[in-house]
Image (spheres, helix red, strand yellow):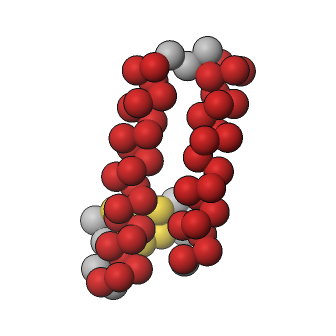
């Protein structure tokens, strides 16, 4: 899980730059994505540190936050 978190963080700027270039994301869209990403990362870190049981997956592989 720690490697997954590190990989996500390292790819964030490249992903955002790609969206700006390909889809013309404006500053508001970039900020909204970053805010959502930060909330998601906090859930992952909480799950890893405290084993909170917040995250689960369904049969399709979708991740759910309780």
Name which residue lies at 61% across and 74% down. 3
All told, the count of numbered labels is 0
Whether residue 17 can be seen here: yes
| Percent of width and height locating residue 45 | 39, 71
The part of the image, by quadrant, that contains residue 9 is: bottom right
x, y percent for residue 53: 31, 79
* Residue occupying image coordinates x 41% and y 30%: 31
- Residue 55 lies in what quarter of the image? bottom left
Q: Is residue 5 above or below residue 47?
A: above
- Residue 34: percent from the left, percent from the top? 43, 40
Asked if residue 60 can be seen in this view, the reply is no
| Left or right relative to 45: residue 59 | right
The picture places residue 19, in percent across and down from the top left corner, at 64, 28
Which quarter of the rendering shows the N terminus? bottom right
Residue 4, picture quadrant: bottom right
At 65% from the left edge and 19% from the top edge, which residue is drawn?
Answer: 23
In the depicted structure, whether residue 37 falls above or below residue 22: below
Give the side of residue 12 with respect to residue 42, left or right. Answer: right
Q: Residue at x 44, y 47 (%)?
A: 37
Q: Closest to the observer: 8 or 61?
A: 8
Residues 13 and 48: in front is 13
Quadrant assignment for the C terminus: bottom left
Residue 31 placement, left or right of 46: right
């Amino acid at each position: 899980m720690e490697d997954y978190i590190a990989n996500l963080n390292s790819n964030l700027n490249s992903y955002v730059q790609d969206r700006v270039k390909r889809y013309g994301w404006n500053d508001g869209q970039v900020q909204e994505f970053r805010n959502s990403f930060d909330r998601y990362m906090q859930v992952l870190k909480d799950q890893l540190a405290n084993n909170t049981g917040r995250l689960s997956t369904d049969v399709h592989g979708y991740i759910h936050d309780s």
